[in-house]
Image (tube, rainbow, N blue to C red):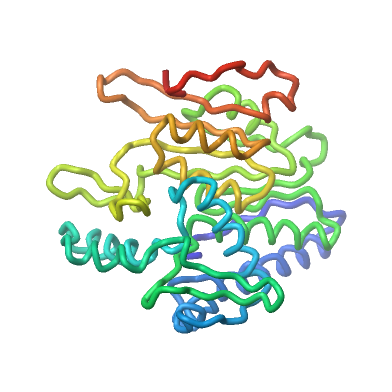
Amino acid sequence: MGLPVRLVLHGVDEPLARHAARTAFERIAALDRIMSDYRSDSELRHLERGAGRFVVVSADLYTVLRRAIEIAQSTDGAFDPTVAPFVKLWREARRTGLMPGEAALAAARAKVGWQHIRFDDVRTAVRLDRPGMALDLGGIAKGYILQQALQTLRGLGVTRAMVESGGDMVVGDPPPGRTGWTIRTDGAGAALASRASNLTNAALATSGATVQFVEIDGVRYSHVIDPRTGLGVTNPRTARVIAGDGATADALATALTVLEPVAAGAVLRRFPGIVASLHRAESERGSAWRVELRYLLLHAARLPRPPNPPADPFE
């Protein structure tokens, strides 16, 4: 995944804890070998080389791709695992400081589109329909991998654990003597911050443009790509999402970074049980603001649900 992974766990004794940690890290490494877009020998790269025909894939890769396409459809393409041709252009732009040319963007656009992936559930096989299609699972695989690490720990009897990497985390049962894990979410809205401060058996993901970006002609382009335009996102928002599993939280945080406020609110209504927060330091008018998008989670927590959210959740 190109990032350090941290485990915090509570076992009944040290030998069990060490064994569980080693096993979880082995599971993480195995999944990285499957889904990495940096490894030429990864299963993901093998699938890409078979574009145009069905390729039988592992259960893990099949599960992630299936979920990725479900979220792509539910976010109207704001999240798209086929965005890799655009990502390649922007990685080069970050290296050179030069804007990708129109011809290059057009060529990449011809290879992008979540609608051009086909599935065979019987054989767990996947087909990429367009020549040159490539996949980037950076917006969902990390969440899935962290979740699987937690599942591995649970299978060994270690239920009190947290797995964290690069701003994303999944947590199980609370530490001994606590009612939940305390996660700081500076800048987030009140409901998400409250939930994160006492988090159990859930996932929290963060996405935004504050760390990885390139500035070209005075415009800051994020490493997060809008699959619908092929351009790096230029808004300074940070999105945080709490969901029941890591893959969903990861992918939705990416999508919310891309979407405009009204569209973000509409998308979240399609995901019961999610709580999300979008914020940035300053608006165009220079005044600080933040917004919280809250739906079924508030209702489930027996808090009043807004009867008719405004058309623009930022207002």
* Residue 102 drawn at (x, y percent): 17, 60
Q: Is residue 103 above or below residue 131?
A: above
Q: How many marks?
A: 0
- Furthest residue toward left: 217
Location of the C terminus (image quadrant):
top left
Q: Which residue is drawn at 78% across and 32% down?
A: 179
For residue 17, which quarter of the picture?
bottom right
Q: Which residue is drawn at 36% across and 76% down?
A: 132
For residue 234, which quarter of the picture?
top left
For residue 311, which quarter of the picture?
top left
Q: Is residue 134 above or below residue 206?
A: below
In this rendering, position of residue 113 left or right of residue 168: left
Depth check, front residue: 148 or 83: 83
Q: Which residue is drawn at 31% across and 18% down?
A: 287
Depth check, front residue: 63 or 182: 63
* Residue 269 drawn at (x, y percent): 58, 33
In this rendering, position of residue 247 left or right of residue 108: right
* Residue 13 drawn at (x, y percent): 85, 57
Q: Residue at x 19, y 43 (%)?
A: 219
